[in-house]
Image (cartoon, helix red, strand yellow):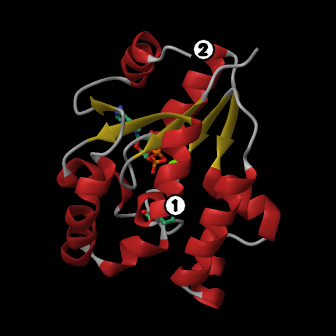
Amino acid sequence: MAGKNIYLIGFMGAGKTTVGKELAEKTGYVFIDLDEYIVEKTRETIPAIFEKHGEEEFRRLEKVSLAELTDSGCIIATGGGIVEDEESVSLMKEKGFTVYLESPFKTLYDRIKEDTNRPLTAQGAAVLSERFNRRLPLYEQAEYTVHTENLRVDEIVEMICRRYDG
Ligand SMILES: Nc1ncnc2c1ncn2[C@@H]1O[C@H](COP(=O)(O)OP(=O)(O)O)[C@@H](O)[C@H]1O
Ligand SMILES: O=C(O)C1=C[C@@H](OP(=O)(O)O)[C@@H](O)[C@H](O)C1
Ligand SMILES: [Mg+2]
């Protein structure tokens, strides 16, 4: 029988999508990227959803989508903002093992600043870092934190596997 889900949380650029894929390969669990799931469901890109319907609507889609993923044995790479919703945080705690991929803001910003597929990056470093600071205590509620700075993706995967007890 499949074990509990692994939810990857953390700010944009933390490696949730990248680590999640490799973790799924290693464990044989099903990989779901929440952003990708929303894109398939709505047939709109993330920037288009933000532009046409606004951030609030994106947050609603994100919350509803997370709640739809009721199967166990999944690796779920969330979007960086999922922790802004209290019920989603409770759901992840209840249904699985939540892992925070932690890195300093500067490292994350350098990874994402050119990426037009992440609409919030257009707000610039100062506004984004405020958002980062606001979210920090929410990410820190995770059951397990991996300090990913200077770690390779395969090393992060290894650490999560060692800590996950199904
Ligand atoms: N541990 C790591 N070391 C170096 N680069 C990484 C690491 N994890 C992810 N990256 C890179 O950072 C970028 C963002 O990764 P991504 O998985 O999309 O993050 P997220 O889904 O958390 O926003 C990608 O270019 C990815 O290759
Ligand atoms: O932090 C955020 O609010 C967001 C993070 C993105 O996902 P990643 O964390 O995978 O980049 C995506 O959900 C959207 O652009 C908003
Ligand atoms: Mg991602």
Q: Residue at x 32, y 50 (%)?
A: 139
Distance (Cα) linking label 1 and label 2: 30 Å
The picture places residue 48, in percent across and down from the top left corner, at 65, 79
Identify residue type, mark 1: Glu
Q: Secondary structure at mark 1?
A: helix
Foreground residue among 113 and 87: 87
Place residue 131 in its image quadrant.
Answer: bottom left
Quadrant the N terminus occupies: top right
Horizontal side of 67 relative to 123 (left or right) equals right
Q: Residue at x 37, y 57 (%)?
A: 112
Q: Residue at x 68, y 55 (%)?
A: 67
The picture places residue 157, in percent across and down from the top left corner, at 45, 20
Identify residue type, mark 2: Lys
In this view, 41 is above or below 4:
below
Place residue 143 in its image quadrant.
Answer: top left
Q: Secondary structure at mark 2?
A: helix
Q: Residue at x 31, y 45 (%)?
A: 141
The picture places residue 73, in percent across and down from the top left corner, at 69, 26
- The residue where tag 1 is placed is 87
Horizontal side of 157 relative to 144 (left or right) equals right
Query: Among all residues in the image, which is located at the extreme top?
Result: 162
Q: Which mark is residue 12?
A: none
Mark 1 surroundings: few (<14), some (14-19) or many (≥20) residues within 10 A: few
The picture places residue 8, in percent across and down from the top left corner, at 48, 39
- The residue where tag 2 is placed is 26
In this view, 78 is above or below 154:
below
